[in-house]
Amino acid sequence: MGQLALQRLQPLASLPRRPPSLPPPSSATPSLPCATASRRPRFYVARAMSSHIVGYPRIGPKRELKFALESFWDGKSNVDDLQNVAANLRKSIWKHMAHAGIKYIPSNTFSYYDQMLDTTAMLGAVPSRYGWESGEIGFDVYFSMARGNASAHAMEMTKWFDTNYHYIVPELGPDVNFSYASHKAVVEFKEAKALGIDTVPVLIGPMTYLLLSKPAKGVEKSFCLLSLIDKILPVYKEVLADLKSAGARWIQFDEPILVMDLDTSQLQAFSDAYSHMESSLAGLNVLIATYFADVPAEAYKTLMSLKCVTGFGFDLVRGLETLDLIKMNFPRGKLLFAGVVDGRNIWANDLSASLKTLQTLEDIVGKEKVVVSTSCSLLHTAVDLVNEMKLDKELKSWLAFAAQKVVEVNALAKSFSGAKDEALFSSNSMRQASRRSSPRVTNAAVQQDVDAVKKSDHHRSTEVSVRLQAQQKKLNLPALPTTTIGSFPQTTDLRRIRREFKAKKISEVDYVQTIKEEYEKVIKLQEELGIDVLVHGEAERNDMVEFFGEQLSGFAFTSNGWVQSYGSRCVKPPIIYGDITRPKAMTVFWSSMAQKMTQRPMKGMLTGPVTILNWSFVRNDQPRHETCFQIALAIKDEVEDLEKAGVTVIQIDEAALREGLPLRKSEQKFYLDWAVHAFRITNSGVQDSTQIHTHMCYSNFNDIIHSIIDMDADVITIENSRSDEKLLSVFHEGVKYGAGIGPGVYDIHSPRIPSTEEIAERINKMLAVLDSKVLWVNPDCGLKTRNYSEVKSALSNMVAAAKLIRSQLNKS
């Protein structure tokens, strides 16, 4: 006793399937929500304290939703199979929270793909290319918006604020006819109610939805998205009426957009929107949840002025300055949902420190008005620590995943109400002290090296124009050189071989031979297609971050610490717990092997320090930039070893550089300065003739283009096609880019195969703003999620398009 129980979500196999008496959806195209479960008797739950969870992971403890989705998409299972898995996941989540004693349990935080896409479905804001006209939106339209289909490309996908989660960007314009087209929120509320669990339905707030949207194709870029507020509010009112009729007593509006730098007109629109909904909100308790950062003073003032709101939720982990605003002014009689348990990391909460924060709030608003909560949805952390059987005991004692964070929230709520578990708090304090004093955390030599690198800006010795000339002499590439981003399809057999080698079921000799054969296949395919700069396909890699972290000190790895990135795509972030070193070379053996198989240039593939940082669960006991510089020094050693081994093209991916950009403009320069510096540390010492590439994907890069230029890479490949060539607009506006650049010519996250003509048209659009001497032709991103038939067809069309435009340039 005395240690936080590692409460397990009930195994899916033990959960009952949906009752057979429930009819399947009546139409051939199934509706998104599952049919409501029949009423079951209430089960025992702990007495609920003033506790709340913003949201919860929907993928399942062992990625049950991922496998159900992919089976459904592949035609291996039917809609009932998918809906049964989803219903069981929701049930297990709600029951876990109820058993833990959580008072305010969220519903409608489950999604088959993305919560913003769910809101688009709720509002009936379906782009016309998907052929939907009216009625309840079904899976065919829903998944077409997310993934595209044979005749229509997918909607744009981009990062959700500064997280590694991606959302589907709504496409809006003055002609969109909004209608109540998905009843998912109400159906899931009823589903929980039938289980005897009263939940708080969660909706993306109208302001966040509109301001994270974009003008649809053909709509002026200057179109004011907030002008649509009066058109979407009637749909929100219909949803609220339905929820009230179903018995809902609370509603949670997620409005994280309030942590951004909003202007006066936007804040006024926010205030007006909730005032207009006031009559519809009558009879409901209303919670407005903000998260990911501090709420600016003007936004806070606007928020506090709302009359229809019962409670306000704040991130008090990343938004400590909000505490000062609360101290100055918090409306009497309102509830304060205090997000003191970190929803974005996996470190166990310092219960004593959090309790002090809660006691500070008690002095301001009163004990009965404080609700203990998570800082944001637990969507951004791993699901359940109890499934980690291989982590060592000491490290495991420092951690808490989503299931454990639910327990932490309730433990704090009980303590705050006067029922403190002294043994539990004592155990937590001992584990916090263990982490602070552990010798595995600190390496004095590494910290000295980091102090030294801060004193130089680490620029290459010559200008990029000079370097490109030296590189062309060595590489002899044609105009519009073609390449891919790095990975090739990760087949089932390939994953099995890696698992067997890791489990020591096959010898190292057999493993290397298998990987070598995979390299030969990938290289032969690229040569047959006529690609100019090759990759080896990364057959030896499980993940672009984990592969490196496994070979660096200071990292730990989970077996089931999966986090949703988008749709069915999950990542398993490494845990950075201590100072970082590179004991030995990580990729030289593999890259050298691959280069010997071809006469064409072969990229050495590395993941950059900022991306390794941003795609890991990072230690919270030192500044992030200190950890990033440690990683940069390790990658620097690898770059120099690759160059010594004769690798002449080295790609250092910084796919997540934009992702870590602070949400507030006042904090962005500091981040960009150290992030760019970290990248330059990795390659500032190489020769002019060694070509340094980097890659970025699925973010809005236009506002950081000058920092991208300052990275001083020789070639950058960057996502472009899925976002309607948004990147090109920055060059239309006069930004000059003298290095090589490859805006992606097709979207690899969709199964759709673009034609040669379509890709050629994209290349011509690029040539309107970029010199043919610097333009590269490549996909948006790596190909690991696609199958070989898709890859062959798409790359064949890509190379054909490049050759077509190349021949036209030669004639002109």
Image (cartoon, grey):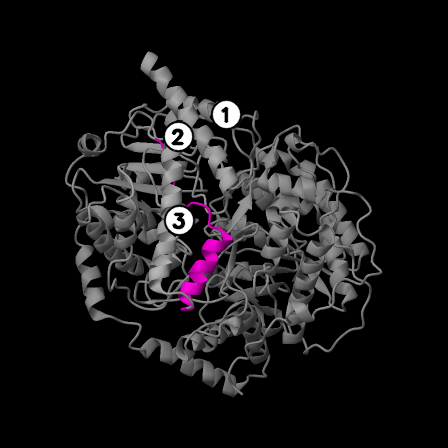
Relative placement, left or right, of 421 versus 591 is right
Q: Which callout, 1 or 3, points to the residue nearer the camera?
A: 3
Q: Residue 758 got which mark?
A: 1
Front residue of 157/785: it is 785
For marks 2 and 1 on the same chain, the one whose residue lies earlier in the sequence: 2
Give residue 578's position: percent from left, percent from top: 32, 68
Which of the two marks, 2 or 1, is nearer to us in this view? 1
Judge whether 564 appears above or below 348 on screen.
Answer: above
- Camera sees residue 812: no
**Residue 143 magenta-drawn?**
no
Give the label, 2 or 3, closer to the camera: 3
Q: Which amino acid, mark 1?
A: Glu
Q: Does 648 appear above or below 726?
A: below
Residue in the picture at 30% in, 36% down: 715
- Residue at 54% x, 88% y is 1
Distance from Cα at disc 2 to Cα at disc 3: 40 Å
Q: In terms of secondary structure, where does tag 3 sit?
A: helix
Q: Rounded to the nearest whole Å, what is the CA distance between mark 1 and mark 3?
A: 31 Å
Q: CA distance from mark 2 to mark 1?
A: 22 Å
What segment carries the magenta color?
482-504
Image check: 138 left or right of 673? right
Mark 1 secondary-structure assignment: helix
